[in-house]
Amino acid sequence: MNTKSDKISAKAKEFFDKIEVSGDLSCEEKDDYFYLNLRVDEPAGLIGYHGQTLEALQLILNLILTKYLGEYTKVVLDISDWRKRREETIKEMAQKTAIKAKFSGEPQILSGLKAFERRIIHMILADHPDVTTESEGEGEERVIKILPKKKD
């Protein structure tokens, strides 16, 4: 176990073994993040409602790894590519909602999204020629608005 990635993989495997979850674990380092993906036969119980269980597992794993490595390390946990599929769904929703905002001329409001989902929408539409985005509200009431740009 030489690399940080190897250490993270080994500790994550130990964690999942202790909670009696088995599957194929992969670890990829990209942009100062370590992306762990655990492929399992029955992912729903590990993902939970809107990814709540997945978020909790990620938090616990991050705390364990921070203590184990002696430094904070950014680890993103995915279960059977759920986050990847969710990201594609969010990107598609952003594009469709941008078109609706453009042609209706009315702001479109998306609610019930997690911070990482709102961030995806902001990034996807950042350079859009016809719409702009803004977040509004606090906590679970936070929404993202997709606003048509004013034409001169």
Image (tube, rainbow, N blue to C red):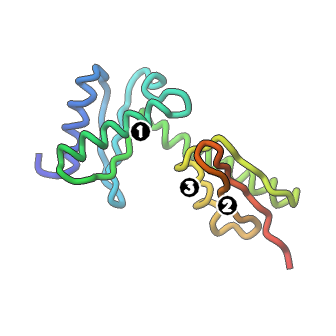
Between 57 and 40, the one lying in front of the other is 57
The residue pinned by badge 2 equals 134
Q: Residue at x 48, y 24 (%)?
A: 44
Q: Residue at x 52, y 49 (%)?
A: 116
Foreground label between 1 and 2 = 2
User: Which amino acid type corresponds to the residue marked 1 in the rendered image?
Assistant: Asp
Q: Position of residue 118 (x, y in %)?
A: 59, 52
- Residue 72 versus residue 11 in the image, above or below: below
Does dot 1 land on a helix, a strand or a loop?
Answer: strand
Answer left or right for 105 relative to 81.
right
The residue pinned by badge 1 equals 78
Image-quadrant location for residue 8: top left
Image-quadrant location for residue 11: top left
Q: Are marks 1 and 3 in contact (CB under 8 Å)?
A: no
Taking the view exactly as shown, the residue that stands out farthest to the bottom is 152
- Residue 121 versus residue 38 in the image, above or below: below
The residue pinned by badge 3 equals 119
Image quadrant holding the C terminus, namely: bottom right
Between 4 and 56, the one lying in front of the other is 56
User: Which amino acid type corresponds to the residue marked 3 in the rendered image?
Assistant: Arg
Q: CA distance from mark 1 to mark 3?
A: 17 Å
Does dot 3 land on a helix, a strand or a loop?
Answer: helix
Foreground label between 1 and 3 = 3
Q: Earlier in the sequence, mark 1 or mark 2?
A: 1
Q: Mark 3: few, some, or many residues within 10 Å (few <14, many ≥20)?
A: few
Q: Are marks 3 and 2 in contact (CB under 8 Å)?
A: no
